[in-house]
Image: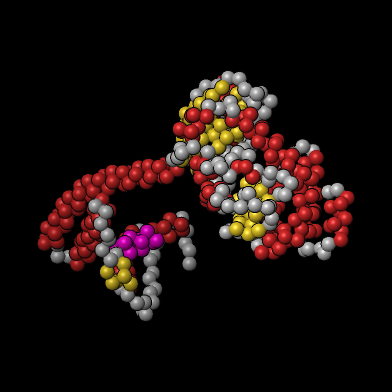
Amino acid sequence: MDSTAFKEFSQMDLNPLWPRLLAELGKLQADFINGEDVLLPLCRVLAELSQSQAVLIFPKDSFESEDMPACTTCWCRDPVRYLTLWKEAKDWPFMNQEPTVHRWQSFVIWPAKRANIQIFFHSASEEWLSFLLLSNETLSEIIMGMLVQQSVGGQESARARVTSTIDSEMFQSIVSNSEDLILVASRSPFGVPSIMYSNAAATSVSHHPRSQLIGKPITMLFKSGLEGDEENPLLQAINCRTDFDGELICTTANNEEALLHMHLVALEETSGHGSLFALVGRDITEQKQLQHIMARTQKMQAMGQLVGGIAHDFNNILGVLKGNLELLELKVTEEKLQRYLKNAFKACQRGTDLTRRLLQFSRQEQFSAHHCQVNEVIAGMEELLGKSLTTQVKLRTVVNRDIADIYVDRGDLEDALLNLVLNAKDAMGGREIS
């Protein structure tokens, strides 16, 4: 800020936005002096102060471009909105008029009077518009120096040098409209691979705007298996300039994971930016999930067939047992033996119910549920439960007479009661518990 701007600032009424803005700009000015790129952090600061959904900084002569120019710096809260942001902004009709702060559709536009720079704020607050109208001159003196040096000449020429090494026809026919994620990166002998180009699909998959991907290491997206892993086949392919074809996990801006089938292609042997290579990836997350569901379905079908066969064989065995018990019942007159036969019949009936449920499972049928009286089910199983516990354990049942009927499969309830009793017996470990 020069002395004139400082004098004007000292004489004006202090807006509540100024203290925080000056503090943030002071930090950015220090980073700018140290040679760091401050455009994206500046976008983020302006977006927070203006309560905007997105901030765009770009040269005025970029409106003829159909896609967002590489020289544009953009910060956007919503990755989905990022995909249509440039189409909304490029229709601005006042390029040839006297530059002034104004609102147009969803944007607040801040055109620089003495620089080839436009700043668009999407859905900014009314307070921010009033602030710009009052503070345009002073604020321009503070930040336009950084913008002119970094946004227009430096970035555009640097990115032009990068993209000039890449065949333009290939990107026109394949990259621009591709549904696959495509990244072009460089492998410098003195650094990690860094992203030099990304297509729109890369934003859709990773949820990172293109402005946040350019210049960043590929480990930003593919964290697992890259950093410090010299045995990783992808790193080996990059270092040896060989092709790679396999699956990688992409970490998105929301810290979620997407499974991509990636293909690595080496592009140029020599370049001022190191060896160039392209990463082409297709999101196969849903496909893998469907494959897992299909595999589980097939497994359940195979299990159902196996269970059905076993149930049929078991039912045949039960039929033989029941037939012999019925013949034995005709010849037995002693009351004690008849009681044993009654318990055996109950066990066979439970086995029959079990095979029925197994057959229902194998045919994927619904279990048969009816209204049951719990006390009645317990009374009918009491003798069977006592015999199952052997003579070492005494069973005593205490029931509540006011229990209402429940809607359940009777066989399932009997199985649950029997399992509870047997588990309790095992937990006692032969000890006497009161």
- Residue 80's place in the image compared with 280, above or below, is below
Residue at 76%, 51% (x, y): give it.
140
Q: Is residue 91 visible?
A: yes
Residue at 62%, 49% (x, y): give it.
95
Q: Nearer the viewer, residue 398 or 166?
A: 166
- Residue 243's place in the image compared with 422, above or below, is above
Q: Residue furthest front?
A: 97
Percent position of residue 277, x then y = 55, 27
Percent position of residue 246, x then y = 47, 31
Percent position of residue 138, x then y = 79, 54
Residue at 58%, 19% (x, y): give it.
269
In this picture the colour scheme is secondary structure
Q: Quadrant of residue 65?
A: top right
Q: Is residue 75 visible?
A: no
The span picked out in magenta is 410-421
Report the side of 339 relative to 195 (left or right).
left
Is residue 415 within the magenta segment?
yes
